[in-house]
Image (spheres, rainbow, N blue to C red):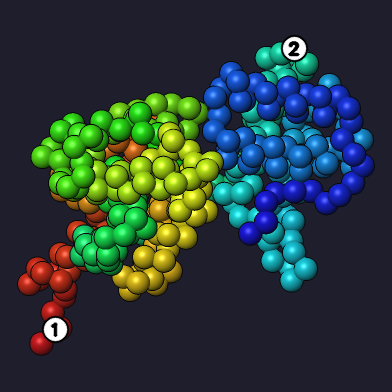
Amino acid sequence: MPEPEAPPGVAARPQITRLLAEHETWLAVERGVAANTLTAYRRDLAGYARFLGQRDYDVGSLGESEVAAFVEHLKAARDEDGRLRFKAASVARAVVAVRSFHRFCFTEGHLTADPSEDVSAPPVPRGIPKALTEAEVEALLGAVSGDGPAALRDRAILETLYATGLRISELVGLDLGALDLCTYDTAASADRSPPTAGGFLRAFGKGAKERLVPVGQTASGAIAAWLPARAEILARARRGDPDAVFVNPRGGRLTRQGCWKIIRGHGLRAGLGGRLSPHVLRHSCATHMVERGADLRVVQELLGHASVSTTQVYTKVTATRLRAVYDTAHPRAKAKPLA
């Protein structure tokens, strides 16, 4: 599905270009917006500027009707086959970007009122996360075979994602200084013996927010086993990243795309088809914790959700599975035929 973008038209006015640049700097410096989010805002607002340029609008004269017209333009846009170009989630994301821009312009005194304040985004259906079963997670973790550097790294990646519920960007952004594996001793790790206790790591999530995340003994052991191999790779690398926890064979920090390919490959080997992604492991971590009685506030803190309402979706997952188990196990769950 393409990103929301108006058809090419008259170039954006210099005033709009300048304000968009100032807004982006504000997002990065004042708000600490993550790089991926910043890219999405930039893309959506470029489409908005082109849309305004087509209609010869000026930022200072913008009203609610112009903002609403942009939203309707995105909702009505269709491809060559007559299908809607943008999903509701894409339109909603564009509305968030436009609101942020106008709020910035209003706060800085470039507008006398915020024209986007009352413009609503289309409702986005909240789907139930497609979590793996615990048996499928075991099969996945058991699919990584061998004791070479790649196997040690991949096992540590999978164990860490499932144990902590990290986002993929948080995982590849992990630095060695963010790890505290308790009893793990880097200098005495040649035997690759697992830690006798779990530990913690510091994750940097959306909005540059930092949180402390517990790491279980199994994941701690997998990381501990990987670190000596990592050190050997970096010792041979010309331009390695000495801070990165997860590196590629050349010693560079593993990218989001590289990590995604690793996870998808092991999912295929474990018989999960194309179902597996880093976010599925995040969903699985949260779902299994809720199913085993974890408090939603604790899971919210673990995942780094700004609101507990985001975390509440996992209660729907549990209810769905509860219904399936009930229908299978209870003797009177299904109506008996009438005599």
Label 1 belongs to which residue?
338
Which x, y percent locates residue 241?
48, 38
Q: Is residue 257 left or right of residue 181?
A: right
- Mark 1 lies on a secondary structure that is loop
- Mark 2 lies on a secondary structure that is loop
Whether residue 6 is visible, yes or no, is yes
Furthest toward the bottom, the residue is: 339
Which x, y percent locates residue 84?
68, 61
Residue 244, located in which quarter of the rendered image?
Answer: top left
Q: Earlier in the sequence, mark 2 or mark 1?
A: 2
Q: Is residue 188 left or right of residue 244?
A: left
Please tell me how crowded label 1 is: few (under 14), some (14-19), or many (20+) other residues with Cα within 10 Å: few
> Foreground: 255 or 318?
255
Label 2 belongs to which residue?
109
User: What whole-number distance in Å separates the C-alpha atoms at marks 2 and 1?
Assistant: 74 Å
Up the image or down, 80 lies above or below 185; here it is below
Furthest toward the left, the residue is: 331
Quarter in which the N terminus is drawn: bottom right
Furthest toward the top, the residue is: 109
> Foreground: 260 or 23?
260
> Foreground: 220 or 71?
220
Task: Name the residue located 65 percent from the left edge and 21 percent from the top edge.
Answer: 26
Which x, y percent locates residue 138?
21, 62
Amino acid at circle 1? Leu
